[in-house]
Image: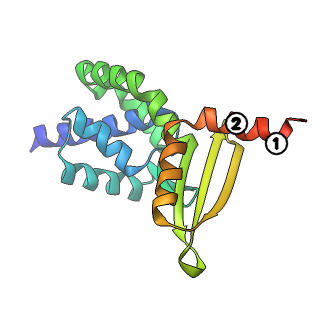
Amino acid sequence: MYENSIELAENKLLLLHIIKSVTIPISNTQLTDIVLENSFINYFTLQQYISELVSTDFLKYVEVDAKKNLELTTKGENVLALFKDRISSQKLTQINNYIASKIEMLKKEFSITADYTLANNDSFIVNLKAIENESILLDLKVNVVSKKQAIDICSKWKSNPTSIYNKIINSLIDEN
């Protein structure tokens, strides 16, 4: 029982550390990917821990663009500061290396979004958004006639947002 309590505390502290290290609110799915790719906790236990950390106000959900993301609370930061030394140095090193290698991808997922919704008359509204340092660079809504077009636009935006953004801006400010 005592060993299980130590492991439970370490795992919850590890989750707090991961969210603090990422520095941006992340989705439950992103956190799950990080934990499962590193084989720290199984899926069902992880979801239970997240729920418990939210109910004890160590983590909270924040809504960003109609999506729920996890964020560390002040209470969670305080607990992590007090007990971080209870996380094994091996796990800390492993997770810090992993996050360092994936942080740009996580930030891109957070700052570049593309989705579509069904509109009237069987058309689709595609919403493309780029955010940098909490400032909206671009928020574009386009009406297209097919789901395939909507999917293609979303895919192209996600794969090359910088080039597309530059083309839009240049075409709007070009004086020729």
x 58%, y 37%: residue = 161
Amino acid identity at mark 1: Leu
Check the image and report above or below for 10 versus 85.
below
Q: Circle 2 sits on which residue?
A: 167
Query: Foreground: 102 or 147?
Result: 147
x 26%, y 55%: residue = 48
Q: Circle 1 sits on which residue?
A: 172
The answer to whether residue 74 of the structure is visible from this angle is no
Left-right relation of 157 to 105: right
x 32%, y 26%: residue = 95
Amino acid identity at mark 2: Lys
Query: Foreground: 58 or 47?
Result: 47
* Of pointers 1 and 2, the one earlier in the residue sequence: 2
Left-right relation of 14 to 159: left
The answer to whether residue 120 of the structure is visible from this angle is yes
- Indicate the quadrant where residue 44 lies: bottom left
Check disc 1 and report its element: helix, strand or loop.
helix
State the quadrant of the N terminus.
top left
In percent of width and height, residue 109 lies at 49, 41
Check the image and report above or below for 100 versus 19.
above
- Indicate the quadrant where residue 10 lies: top left
